[in-house]
């Protein structure tokens, strides 16, 4: 039971240190709390962008529509040229898929089956065209995926004419690029803010522990004269930093839940109302809770242990 008594002693001393310097301890918690909330909020925004992005079908599909006047031979020529592009560009997956205008009509009627006007279109009244669909990897480099379009526009038929016009090519590469840019910006801003606040947190917690060391300097010297080990002297101060970090993590999880439920959901609700049929959704907070909890605890432990160690190294000289 010796280890248990030692644990209780260190825990008591750590708690006493926090209450002994309550103002600095509060400042430490608030700064760490701000750091964690910023990290958590940026993560939740990016995670929901990715989830909504993945719900949209065919964003990584490039459609090459075939002019209605082309013969079967010309359609086959285009298909062969697209197959050559597949061999040369590694970002493309599988093979080019030919989609007949009848298949397009079926998809169209399936998509708009709830609309009365969709029944007007049938095999005899089909304004759609044949097409080829090219799929690029969902995690492909945007700059590499963008090379596909010029290659398609350069395809020529056997008579020397260009096979398709740029208006016949439909893709979401630009949307991919915009979303990737937003994600990179959010990540960069979030990391910078996290870094700045984390450094501030370290200094604030260090000063809190330094005050505790200074207030107990006579007690510490007495323990050293009595033969107390370095670990015995250090542990209560490290526990103090860890308690501050973990308490901040617990508060951050609760604050993040409130922000997610009332602020982010309100923003999404307003966007969905403003943009009819936008279909933007927020994933349940519980899905992100394990990762957020682990990250917040890691930040809290890191800040507490590092700041405690630095403070003790300078002031205790043990």
Image: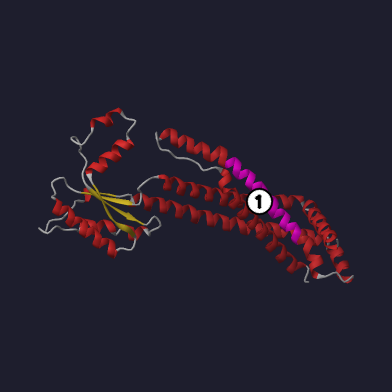
Looking at the rendered structure, the number of numbered marks drawn on it comes to 1
| Magenta residues (range) | 238-259
Determine whether, in the image, residue 118 is placed left or right of residue 230. Answer: left
Q: Residues within 10 Å of mark 1 (few under 14, many from 20)?
A: many
Name which residue lies at 43% across and 51% down: 182
Residue extending furthest top? Answer: 116
Residue 301: x, y in percent? Answer: 67, 58
Residue extending furthest left? Answer: 159
Query: In the image shown, does 61 or 142 lie closer to the viewer?
Result: 61
Residue 288: x, y in percent? Answer: 56, 48
Determine whether, in the image, residue 238 is placed left or right of residue 90. Answer: right
* Residue under pointer 1: 249
Name which residue lies at 56% across and 42% down: 260
Residue 140: x, y in percent? Answer: 38, 59
> In which quadrant will I find the N terminus?
bottom right
Magenta stretch, main secondary structure, is helix
Query: In the image shown, does 144 or 39 lie closer to the viewer?
Result: 144
Q: Secondary structure at mark 1?
A: helix
Name which residue lies at 24% across and 58% down: 82
The quarter holding residue 245 reads bottom right
């Amino acid at each position: 039971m010796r280890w248990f008594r030692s644990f209780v002693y260190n825990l008591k001393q750590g708690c006493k240190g926090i209450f002994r310097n309550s103002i600095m301890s509060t400042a430490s918690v608030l700064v760490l709390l701000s750091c964690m909330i910023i990290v958590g909020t940026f993560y939740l925004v990016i995670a929901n962008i990715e989830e909504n992005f993945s719900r949209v079908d065919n964003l990584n599909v490039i459609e090459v529509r075939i002019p209605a006047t082309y013969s079967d031979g010309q359609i086959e020529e285009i298909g062969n040229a697209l197959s050559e592009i597949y061999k040369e560009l590694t970002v493309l997956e599988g093979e080019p898929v030919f989609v007949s205008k009848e298949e397009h009509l079926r998809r169209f009627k399936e998509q708009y089956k709830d609309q009365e006007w969709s029944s007007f279109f049938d095999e005899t009244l089909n304004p759609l065209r044949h097409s080829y669909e090219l799929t690029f990897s969902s995690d492909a480099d945007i700059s590499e995926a963008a090379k596909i379009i010029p290659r398609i526009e350069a395809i020529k038929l056997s008579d020397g004419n260009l096979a398709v016009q740029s208006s016949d090519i439909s893709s979401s590469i630009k949307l991919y690029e915009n979303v990737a840019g937003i994600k990179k910006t959010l990540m960069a801003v979030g990391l910078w803010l996290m870094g700045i606040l984390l450094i501030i947190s370290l200094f604030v917690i260090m000063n809190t522990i330094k005050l505790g060391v200074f207030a107990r300097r006579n007690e510490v010297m007495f323990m050293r004269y009595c033969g107390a080990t370095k670990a015995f002297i250090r542990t209560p101060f490290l526990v103090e930093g860890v308690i501050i970090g973990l308490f901040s993590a617990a508060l951050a999880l609760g604050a993040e839940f409130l922000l997610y439920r009332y602020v982010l959901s309100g923003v999404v609700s307003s966007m969905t109302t403003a943009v009819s049929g936008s279909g933007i959704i927020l994933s349940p907070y519980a899905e992100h809770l394990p990762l957020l909890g682990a990250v917040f605890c890691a930040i809290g432990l890191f800040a507490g242990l590092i700041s405690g160690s630095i403070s003790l190294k300078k002031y205790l000289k043990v």
